[in-house]
Image (cartoon, helix red, strand yellow):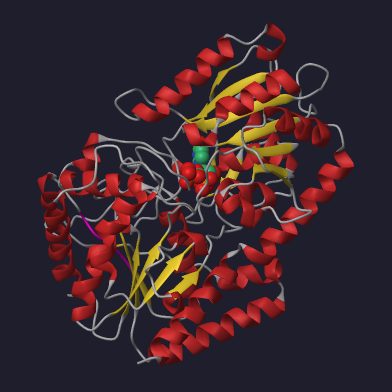
Amino acid sequence: MVPVGAKVITPVAEGRQSPGEAGQIGGEEASYGYAITCDAVLAPPWAAAGPTPGGRADAVSLVHVVEVPERSAARLEPVIGSQRYAQLTQAADRVRQLLAGRTIWNVNSTATGGGVAEMLQALVGYVNDLGVPIGWLVITGDARFFATTKRLHNQIHGDLAGGPLDAAEAHHYTRMLTANAVELLGRIRPGDVALLHDPQTAGLAAPLAAAGARVVWRCHIGVDWENDATQAGWDFLQPHLGSAEGYVFSRRQYAPAWLPDDKVSVIPPSIDPFSPKNQDLDAATVRAVLATLGVLDGAAPQVPARFIRRNGHPGTVTRPAAIIGDGRPGPDDPVLIQVSRWDRLKDMGGVMRAFADHVVPGGGGYLMLVGPAVAGVSDDPEGAAVYGECLLQWHDLPPEARARIMLVTLPLDDIDENAAMVNALQRHATVIAQKSLAEGFGLTVSEGMWKGRPVIGSEVGGIIDQIAAGTGLLLPDPADLKAFGQAVRLLLGDPAEATRLGLAARAHVRENFLGDVHLLRYAKLLGALISRT
Ligand code: UDP
């Protein structure tokens, strides 16, 4: 999660979601996930002729229910241990009692695509299974609304392109959310908890609170500095947020100073060990996925590239990646991988330069820069532009670097398959990089660490919270290519150190960034909120 440009997610492709799940109606600047823009999702939903892809036919409604299948929380027990599991079930019992028949409602603006939706799929599923009444509602906006919230998203990340939002835009934002609130109040009862996610929903706080809901606003984005843009973004949101009783941020530094300290909770994102992105894959399956992608020299899949989809059904990776590179590593060659959207702040170009200048001469190994497919200029202008710059940069490399540096783009036709590809690549990596220039949280860091890989990250934003001492390498200056190259050479050349860091990394993620920790933090917040009644 990072300051980004376009982040509207495409409509749902077949096979990506469970049968009862509502489809993508509007769009949002997802807090994490791959960025794809698509005109279709910006069309007002009421203009749609039929049911949204993969969703329920409910064309005249602004608000859609996402039906999340129960996800057995007991599966977490062998991963987190019986003591933590007991804490989770006890917290669930407490929250259920406190709720006394009332419901927790998550409200956001997309059912699929991006980190927020991915996290809700997992967490709502677990909470469901734990017997706590919980629901997930998705609001709708029109093109103008999402254009406004996209600018708002960029402003909160320090980018004031287009200038501050004017009164007409503020009016339209409020109007759209007031209309959604009317529908939401058909489901959200007085005393229910409304957990509103991100700036797209901030304008719901007042009408829902006025109707008796207990409102908490959860912001998944932020930066730990201020400028005119962040000021403008928070100025826009401030009047809407007064009626919320609690505020949640991924880092304390992301909360604006005017929010009362005692109402701010810090809950960092979590990863789910059973999602296609993070589930265990044995070595043969990893090899099969990589062979299918075409990133290894001469390798052919010996076993099917199987994984388990989010809906529990088996899936197979069948699509190849699009690859630029004059050579391919052999299956046993050391590989450095950075998985990111093609976003300037992820600094894929810097990773390439550092590897070409400071690793290739004298050091071994290969570099894979991995990101989502860039469908074309109209689909994701920013992503396509950044990818294009990387491509030009790659062409200018000396031949010995071109033979060891690959640009890999992964197809997005099937989100679960894409996640399984990322999973296999991260598991295959000898070392993982996240050389971001800025980073809200950086889920790829936890993902890599969970796979027992040593991660080299820049000391920025949420990466600082994830790479604790002894669990990876934090580089103080993201622009210092030489230091980055030295760290890469150190770890590619020292398997024992890489293994030691990787083991500590996995333990650190298990301790801090799995779903039970996330839910316990919410339980604490809800306990305080409800007993304040
Ligand atoms: N990702 C993916 N496929 C890709 C590239 C990225 O699924 O081709 C995922 C990545 O695994 C991570 C998310 O997109 O889960 C990116 O989240 P992060 O917080 O690292 O950065 P953001 O993109 O939100 O700035």
Q: Is residue 236 visible?
A: yes
Residue 429 sits in which quadrant? Answer: top right
Q: Residue at x 47, y 45 (%)?
A: 2
Counting from the top left corner in percent of width and height, residue 260 is at 40, 75
Image: 327 above or below 224: above
Estimate the x, y position of residue 200 in percent, counting from the top left: 28, 56
Against 83, residue 484 (above or below) is: above
Judging depth in this view, the residue of 251 and 479 nearest the camera is 479
Q: Is residue 381 left or right of residue 430?
A: left
Name the residue rendered at 45%, 29% in the picture: 373
Question: Is the residue 367 above or below the residue 117 in the image?
Answer: above
**What's the magenta region?**
136-140
Q: Residue at x 22, y 43 (%)?
A: 147
Q: Position of residue 204 (x, y in %)?
A: 23, 67
Frontmost residue, 415 versus 532: 532
Query: Magenta stretch: residue 79 in it?
Result: no
What residue do we see at 47% from left, 31% from top? 411
For the question of whether residue 297 can be seen, the reply is: no
The foreground one among 444 and 148 is 148
- Where residue 28 sits: x, y (%)? 31, 49
| Left or right for 375, reference 348 | left
